[in-house]
Amino acid sequence: MRYVYMANLETDPDGGMLVTFADVPEAVTHGETLSEALSNAREALGLALRGIVQEGRTTPVPLAVDGVAVAVDAEEAIKLAVIEAFREAGISKRELARRLNKSENEARRILDPDHPSKLSQLQDAMQALGKTIVISVLEAA
């Protein structure tokens, strides 16, 4: 699971730069400078992807090849990956809680995209789902 999408940057006639994502049309933002636009793009992308999973939809597959690569924050990417792995597993929240030896409320919080979770909790959840978190560091664009 990768949460890196290509951003389209255009000069905004009202000033600054407009940022959109072909693969995530819900993510639209703006910045006065390139740096601000890219920072805002990372935040807008994360918010859009969280909204998508909250609606029960699967995050879009990154298909676009043109533009500037923008990755969501690492913590957000891991949270999204756990939620998607949980859905792929086809188990209940109660079953995840059982596998984690935690209450169902704790499992619900782990699966809530807006609730902050500790990395150790997310790693445990991924392991309970038969997956491993691997972090890649790429050159910045």
Image (cartoon, rainbow, N blue to C red):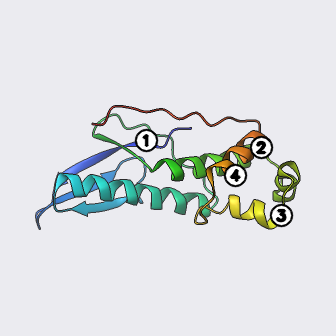
Compared to residue 110, the image places residue 4 above or below, namely: above
Q: CA distance from mark 4 to mark 3?
A: 14 Å
From mark 1 to mark 4, how far is it between C-alphas? Answer: 23 Å
State the residue position of label 3: 104
Query: Where residue 14 sits in the image (x, y, percent)?
Result: 11, 68
Q: Is residue 50 above or below residue 132?
A: below
C-alpha span from label 4 to label 2 = 18 Å
Return the residue at label 4: 121
Q: Which residue sits at x=43%, y=37%? A: 63
Give the residue type at disc 4. Gln
The quadrant of the image that shows the C terminus is top left
The type of residue carrying mark 1 is Val
Q: Earlier in the sequence, mark 4 or mark 3?
A: 3
In the picture, measured across the screen, residue 67 lies left or right of residue 100, that is left
Residue at the image position 86 percent from the left and 48 percent from the top? 99
Q: Secondary structure at mark 1?
A: strand
**Distance between the alpha carbons at the discs numbered 2 and 3:** 17 Å
Q: Distance of mark 2 from mark 1, alpha carbons?
A: 23 Å
For the residue pair 11 and 106, the one nearer the viewer reads as: 106
Q: In the rendered structure, which amino acid carries the disc numbered 3?
A: Glu
Query: Residue 76: x percent and y percent?
Result: 52, 53
Name the residue carrying label 1. 4
Tag 4's secondary structure? helix
Q: Quick check: marks 3 and 1 in contact, CB under 8 Å?
A: no
User: Earlier along the polypeptide chain: callout 4 or callout 2?
Assistant: 2
| Quarter of the N terminus within the rendering | top right
